[in-house]
Image (tube, rainbow, N blue to C red):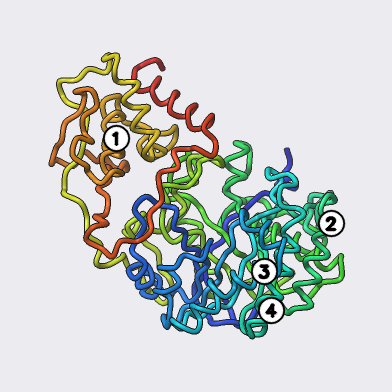
């Protein structure tokens, strides 16, 4: 397969917005803040983490009350999201949209001074894997939210947008100049873009090159990085040396082709996970993020848009309760661990390093591990591991992941400990058919971390998510757990 065929593959971009681009705003870093975690970082601590690392803008995937309150008078601009499951009711009635805006936008602006600038209607609703689930509700919901903002007197201050996956556009020629919107949604895309344009609102696109590496082992790895050495892809007078520029300019070509050459664009999500796959690792994440930050600090855009757009890094922290339907890496997108600890260091500009979260309190320094006397041939071991991994995050144990080279007993120990920590070291939680025991000796083996969770009881209790355990795709989760059990029990 030739490199040209990869031009639309998803890529990975990060941070930093610019007030010199087509979307005006505060110069600084921008980030996605997700809260699908069994032990979410306390909102006040997360906001301080954002500020101390220079983030001036943040995107929330839902109107989380604690986050919106903590962001009040913080100096951080906010994009607040509406989950896809809300699109149908919002599309059905303007009054529903009016109520939503009053509860989730107006009240936080007036009562807490939260600087909400955008409402993101849906999240990648036209993703091909969703088929036509949201095709008939996204645009009406967008129109009703806009009407509700106008009624609330916020039509100028708060803009609507729809975060879309990069699969909404394509190129038959394999070159950016051939870009156009997907034929099955072309008319709908033009209607939405015209509506956004008429209301001086931006189009938001998420671009993920990592997924290209995940899907195709023959993808040219260097083409995913700004400082790679891949041979350029030549498109007329333009030479593309990385897939992000090619992907983004494919969108710009599609906009130009349909009469929207000046349409403002936001890159709503770009990121690189650090675990859960052989290409999801610290080195790749650091390599790309650092080159990206350097590039944007220098004010470098793409061949078709010389000024960089607002770009939101995905994501602030890891989220261990996310669905693993896309892959085990889905829980490891953070530039920080779940608790705000630094994964890898970066120069954020002018020599400023990343700063970890402060004020985080943890459970007792103890771990649940497989007992030295226990045997991996014990018939109770497979069910014990399956139970632990069904209720806790074992994705770091997968092939190519940070804990993927542990021996059989250490694999079982990791599973037992993740369950023990996820349920807050509850009494009796480290009793897997007499196979486990508590230890105060850290069993971590670089690069595999045996976690100790935050003590939510010592913080202002944030809303927490029940562990998803792959419930959105039980077959995929059970296949992963089954393969893990076979590895641990020596079947491989």
Please give the residue where the numbered disc 2 appears in the rendered image.
Answer: 186
Q: Residue at x 43, y 81 (%)?
A: 112
Q: Residue at x 53, y 67 (%)?
A: 59
Relative horizontal placement of residue 6, taking residue 402 as reference (left or right): right
The earlier-in-sequence mark between 3 and 1 is 3
Q: Give neighbour class at mark 2: few <14, some 14-19, many 20+ (Cα, 10 Å).
A: some
As drawn, the label of residue 22 is 4
Relative horizontal placement of residue 389, taking residue 5 as reference (left or right): left
Between residues 324 and 248, which one lies in front from this camera angle? 324
Is residue 139 something that shows in the picture? yes
Could you tell me which secondary element the residue under label 1 belongs to? helix
Q: Are marks 1 and 2 in contact (CB under 8 Å)?
A: no
As drawn, the label of residue 323 is none
Please give the residue where the numbered disc 1 appears in the rendered image.
Answer: 414
The span from disc 2 to disc 3 (Cα, nearest Å) is: 18 Å
Where's residue 295, x and y in %? 55, 69
Report the mark closest to the observer, 4 or 2.
2
The earlier-in-sequence mark between 4 and 3 is 4
Q: Residue at x 63, y 42 (%)?
A: 219
Could you tell me which secondary element the residue under label 4 belongs to? loop
The earlier-in-sequence mark between 2 and 3 is 3
Could you tell me which secondary element the residue under label 2 belongs to? helix
Q: Give neighbour class at mark 1: few <14, some 14-19, many 20+ (Cα, 10 Å).
A: many
The span from disc 4 to disc 3 (Cα, nearest Å) is: 15 Å
Where's residue 396, x and y in %? 39, 39
Report the mark closest to the observer, 3 or 1.
3
Q: Give neighbour class at mark 3: few <14, some 14-19, many 20+ (Cα, 10 Å).
A: many
Between residues 399 and 303, which one lies in front from this camera angle? 399
């Amino acid at each position: 397969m030739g490199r040209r065929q990869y031009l639309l593959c998803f890529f990975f971009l990060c941070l930093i917005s610019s007030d010199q681009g087509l979307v005006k705003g505060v110069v600084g870093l921008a980030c996605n803040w997700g809260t699908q975690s069994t032990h979410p970082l306390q909102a006040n601590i997360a906001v301080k983490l954002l500020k101390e690392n220079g983030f001036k803008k943040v995107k929330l995937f839902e109107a989380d009350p604690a986050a919106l309150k903590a962001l009040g008078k913080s100096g951080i601009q906010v994009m607040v999201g509406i989950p896809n499951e809300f699109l149908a009711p919002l599309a059905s009635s303007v009054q529903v949209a009016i109520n939503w805006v009053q509860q989730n936008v107006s009240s936080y602006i007036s009562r807490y001074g939260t600087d909400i600038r955008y409402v993101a209607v849906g999240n990648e609703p036209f993703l091909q894997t969703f088929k036509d689930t949201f095709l008939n509700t996204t645009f009406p919901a967008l129109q009703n939210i806009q009407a509700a903002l106008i009624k609330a007197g916020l039509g100028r201050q708060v803009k609507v947008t729809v975060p879309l996956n990069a699969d909404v556009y394509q190129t038959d020629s394999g070159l950016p100049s051939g870009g156009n919107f997907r034929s099955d949604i072309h008319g709908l895309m033009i209607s939405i873009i015209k509506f956004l344009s008429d209301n001086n609102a931006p189009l938001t696109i998420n671009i993920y090159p990592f997924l290209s590496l995940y899907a195709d082992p023959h993808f040219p790895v260097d083409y995913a990085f700004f400082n790679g050495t891949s041979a350029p892809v030549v498109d007329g007078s333009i030479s593309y040396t990385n897939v992000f520029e090619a992907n983004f300019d494919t969108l710009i070509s599609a906009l130009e082709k349909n009469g929207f050459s000046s349409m403002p664009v936001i890159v709503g999500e770009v990121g690189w996970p650090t675990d859960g796959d052989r290409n999801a690792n610290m080195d790749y994440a650091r390599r790309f993020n650092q080159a990206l930050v350097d590039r944007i600090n220098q004010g470098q855009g793409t061949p078709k848009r010389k000024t960089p757009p607002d770009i939101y890094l995905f994501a602030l922290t890891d989220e261990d309760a996310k669905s693993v339907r896309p892959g085990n890496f889905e829980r490891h997108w953070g530039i920080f661990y779940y608790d705000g600890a630094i994964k890898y260091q970066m120069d954020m500009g002018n020599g400023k390093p990343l700063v970890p979260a402060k004020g985080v309190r943890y459970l007792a320094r103890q771990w649940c591990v497989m007992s030295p006397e226990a045997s991996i041939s014990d018939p109770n071991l497979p069910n014990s591991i399956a139970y632990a991994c069904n209720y806790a995050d074992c994705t770091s144990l997968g092939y190519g992941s940070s804990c993927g080279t542990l021996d059989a007993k250490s694999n079982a120990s990791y599973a037992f400990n993740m369950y023990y920590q996820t349920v807050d070291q509850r009494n009796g939680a480290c009793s897997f058919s007499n196979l486990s025991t508590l230890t105060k000796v850290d069993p971590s083996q670089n690069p595999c971390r045996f976690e100790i969770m935050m003590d939510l009881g010592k913080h202002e209790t944030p809303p927490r998510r029940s562990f998803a355990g792959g419930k959105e795709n039980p077959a995929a989760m059970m296949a992963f757990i089954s393969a893990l059990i076979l590895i641990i029990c020596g079947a491989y």
